[in-house]
Image (cartoon, coloured by chain):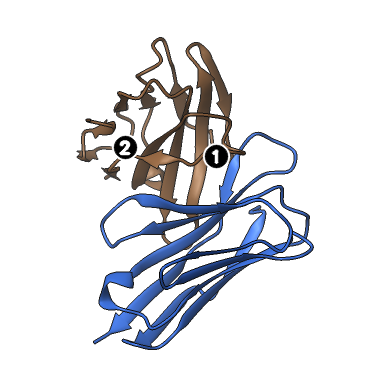
Chain colours: A brown, B blue
Amino acid sequence: DAGITQSPRYKITETGRQVTLMCHQTWSHSYMFWYRQDLGHGLRLIYYSAAADITDKGEVPDGYVVSRSKTENFPLTLESATRSQTSVYFCASSVADRNTGELFFGEGSRLTVL
Amino acid sequence: GQQVMQIPQYQHVQEGEDFTTYCNSSTTLSNIQWYKQRPGGHPVFLIQLVKSGEVKKQKRLTFQFGEAKKNSSLHITATQTTDVGTYFCASPRSSARQLTFGSGTQLTVLP
């Protein structure tokens, strides 16, 4: 049972470059989420998706783009990376509306923007 | 801003001592979840509380949801080194379909 996997686990890039973080889940969960984790800020929601082709903004969406053409994949793209986007990014999924369902997190992708 | 405030930010305890972390909100919460994140790891779901005044136990961990559903606590009895990590509470935002996390309490257990 692979669960939810993220790639790459570690990435170093330069300011202005485009970066895509991949997220894949094998449970067929309806909901998927992208969070970023920074010291002093806990986990902040970037984007989420209720189903394939349905996405919505979270708390900190600026500078990010998501898509969800298939239920199992939810890539996060930084169109032009900035230093402030240096963070640990977590993908998560939930079988139901997060109001009633627990989140299952991936291992995280640590991104450094130079 | 965040819906829930979590305190303390850091807590160092001697192994065997108790530990408590608190989450407080100015508004009524529909439910609250708790997660644990080990150093270098990812958050892992512990429990969800839904009812006013609810108390749930998992071995040495006791979770409470306040009567007014505006606060919650996680208490660990007789901490062990395996309890090390950051504990987060999380709750849906009242006006949006988003789960908002508290800033977390980082627990260090000294042997």
Disc 2 + disc 1, Cβ < 8 Å? no
- Image quadrant containing the C terminus of chain B: bottom left
In percent of the image, x 41 and y 36: which residue is there? A92
Labels 2, 1: one chain: yes
Q: Is residue A71 above or below residue A14?
A: above
Res. B12 visible in picture: yes
In percent of the image, x 44 and y 84: which residue is there? B18
Q: Chain of mark 1?
A: A
As rendered, which of A77 and B100 lies closer to the eye? B100
Q: Which residue is mark 1?
A: A60
The image quarter containing residue B54 is bottom right
Q: Within 10 angstroms of label 2, few (less than 14), some, or many (20 or more) residues?
A: some
Label 2 – label 1 distance at C-alpha = 19 Å
Q: Is residue A91 above or below residue B8?
A: above
In percent of the image, x 55 and y 39: which residue is there? A60
The image quarter containing residue A112 is top left
Res. B24 visible in picture: no
Element type where label 1 sits in the image: loop
Element type where label 2 sits in the image: loop
- Give the amino acid at mark 2: Thr
Find residue A44 and name its label. Answer: none
Lateral position of residue B72 relative to residue A29, left or right: right
Image location (x, y in percent) of residue B11 = 43, 80
Q: Nearer the viewer, mark 2 or mark 1?
A: 1
In percent of the image, x 63 and y 64: which residue is there? B5
Image location (x, y in percent) of residue B93 = 68, 44
Image location (x, y in percent) of residue A86 = 35, 46
Q: Which residue is mark 2?
A: A15
Image location (x, y in percent) of residue B102 = 56, 58
- Give the amino acid at mark 1: Val
Q: Chain of mark 2?
A: A
